[in-house]
Amino acid sequence: MDLTISLPPVGTSVQQPDVPGGADQQAMGVYLRVRPFSRQELCDDQDQDCVVIESSQTVTLNAPRGSATMKSSEKGVGTTAHRFSFSQIFGPETTQAELYENTVQSQMSDFLDGKNVLMFSYGVTNAGKTFTIQGTPEEPGILPRVLDATFHHIGGDQYEGMDLKPYLRNDAQCLNPEQVKQERSAKAAIFASVKEHCDPVQASGGSESSLSQPSVSCSHTVLGSHPAEAGSSQFALWVAFFEIYNECVYDLLQPALCSKFMRRPALRVREDSTGNAYVKGLRWVNIQNMGEACKLLQFGNKKRSAAATKMNQSSSRSHSIFTMKLLKIEGSAVRRMSEFSLCDLAGSERCNKTNTIGERLKEAGNINNSLLILGKCITALRNNQTDGTKSSYIPFRESKLTKLFQAFFCDSGRASMIVNINQCASTYDETLHVMKFSAVARQVITHKPLESLAPCLVGCDGKTLVRNGMIDNQPLDTYLLEEELLDEDEADFSLLPQNELVNMLESLRTKLLAERRRNLEQEIEIRKEMGDAMLQQLMESEELRRREVEELKEGYQEKLENTFEMYKEAIKAHAYQSAMNSLEDNYVHVDEFIAEQEKVEVLRHKVSELETSTRGVSAVPTVDRLCQTEASQTADPCNWLHNKKRAIARACEDMQELILSLERRLTELSDNLQKVRDGFLEKSAALRRMPDDQAKSVADIVGDSVEEDTESTSLKAQHAKFSQPKTKQGLFASIRDAVTSPRKGTSGRALRRAVQTAQT
Ligand SMILES: Nc1ncnc2c1ncn2[C@@H]1O[C@H](COP(=O)(O)OP(=O)(O)OP(=O)(O)O)[C@@H](O)[C@H]1O
């Protein structure tokens, strides 16, 4: 988990932060506890002097070989040694009692004085967090010691009645006899289920400090300064034990479910009318001695989500919170109520180190997420405090854990932290992250907690009975439930006394304004974060698309080239195959080829002889050339001549058709001439009968007729030419004449005759 924390320069110790506020403000208590090596760890060569305690407040971490930190420093990023300072450092030899006396005792006196206190343990898995908070029967941890000290403080002033109970976050409720009965039977059910498993000495519950067995030597000197006011006040201690697992809150003091297949009901985190978070429906149990406390712890621990991981056989997979509420009772009024919460956070392990898969991986994700938010809250708190002008958003509401912690950090409480580390080389990098986190936490300033005001006492139905220790004269049931106050439509404010109403309105107005301002700031912050995130996402997806398109293009290009190459190869292969096939088909042995050539030569000779012997044919050079060329191409000259004869016959037929068409046209023209002549004669006669002024136009008409007459004459002359007998020449010369100048050359009939002669 990277908490993205800016650190002071390496090699310098983190200075104790200046506390501007003076006496009522102090730096958050951050203690370091270094666990001793286990025998197994020593065998595994985990002792590489990674953790060197320099003084009671300063420790240096040296990166071992193979760690990511060492690798980074080898690349020139960062260094191998990091120094950190703490409120106090407890080495491996520190006993549980020493730790308690030097860390919790001052908080303990605050708690007994009516102030709210939070203490949480933070560290990687297997670092000793649970050992520090709960300990073992032989070496009890902080929690049993706090309980023991509380009972010692209560002494004989135990409030026996169970009718005054914590309610919401800071209020108390007055139970009716029926409810008291229910409380007793619920408590008895819990104890009944742990009876067999609980150590008989601890379970006896006879002693008010049953934990004060030989192994536990708990100093109660601090309590001497604030002894319970004998006779005047009584005390009631109520405890709750719950866990936050996978971001769901589960009550560890709920009776066992009927079936193991039933799912545990998850509880909701709500806010009371003053904005303080509380777990709705959480079971509070009144305990009156250490025996009962021990049984409750056993009952709850059995239900806690733990699992064997690679690094810890019994690793806590959830954040467990044990909360004590001490009610100071005078008569039937609760004068004061204070809270002590002890939180054993789940290990901040890395997924790869712990072999986390499946459910364990999901757990690790949720654990790391809530720890990350805790880190963000602490960083934001520090930033806001160090820079007075800054008021950045603190994301308390982003996880259940930080929601419940908010009150301790912001106003009505005091928080302190015990950082647990082991000295193993294999977990060095994670340990370094934990130390960086604690370096920031060390700079957070906490306000000295104010003594809590008398809680608002509500009746068995949840309606307010007492405010600030004063019992109102108004009928008890005229006050409103928190839910009703939140629902404006149903709230009947007119039932409240006037001065109460004015005060209430004023405080509500102030709260509303503060809430609106906070909401607005949060909204702006969230919008900005969302906008940035969306922009980032867009840019990333754009880049991704671009890369995908490029990859696709390259892929298709490559495919195309491959296909093209494939086809080229196929065509080449096919061409080669075809060439080979045709080579096989046309293969002629060289002797055969020579013989054939000789045959051709003989035939050619014969053809030339034939040509020479054919008169007239030899006179046509074109045909001769044609014959020579084609005769050389064919081995059978007779066949060739036959073909040629057929071709010439076809040509003659065409010529005949041409001659016929010309004759038809000549006939048409003769007919026209005849018509024109008739017309001319008619018009000449008419002319003679017509006056002189029309003579010119008639002359034009006559002119036209004369032209036509001229044409007619020339046609006639042509016809005569066609009709004249012609000197017999070569066949092809005659054809050529007929084709090139049909009007001037031989007549159709003469041409036909010439062809016929050639054919015979
Ligand atoms: N100061 C100590 N002296 C002796 N043994 C210790 C000490 N601290 C821890 N151990 C032992 O180390 C082991 C791991 O401790 P523990 O279970 O408390 O770790 P953890 O940090 O709570 O782990 P996880 O986060 O996985 O629950 C336990 O066997 C515990 O008894």
Image (tube, helix red, strand yellow):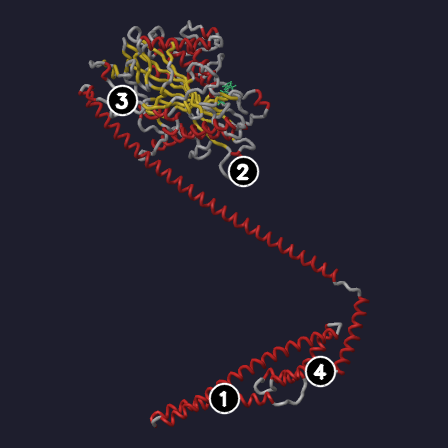
- Up-down: is 611 above or below 303? below
Write down the residue under mark 1: 711
Residue neighbourhood size for the residue with mark 1, other residues' Cα within 10 Å, grouped as few (<14), some (14–19), many (≥20)? some
State the separation of the CA atoms marked 3 and 1: 128 Å
State the separation of the CA atoms marked 2 and 4: 107 Å
Residue 141 locus on image (x, y percent): 45, 16
Tell me, yes or no, if residue 97 can be seen here: no
Residue type at numbered disc 3: Glu
Does residue 498 appear left or right of residue 348 in this picture? left
Queried on whether the Cβ of the residue with tag 1 lies below 8 angstroms from ligand 1, the answer reads no
Residue 299 locus on image (x, y percent): 45, 13
The single residue placed furthest to the top in the displayed view is: 206
Q: Secondary structure at mark 2?
A: helix
Of residue 281 and residue 290, the one placed in the foreground of this image is 281
Residue neighbourhood size for the residue with mark 4, other residues' Cα within 10 Å, grouped as few (<14), some (14–19), many (≥20)? some
Q: Give the mark toward the camera: 4 or 1.
A: 1
Occupied quadrant, residue 728: bottom right
Of residue 239 and residue 13, the one placed in the foreground of this image is 239
Residue 613 locus on image (x, y percent): 76, 83
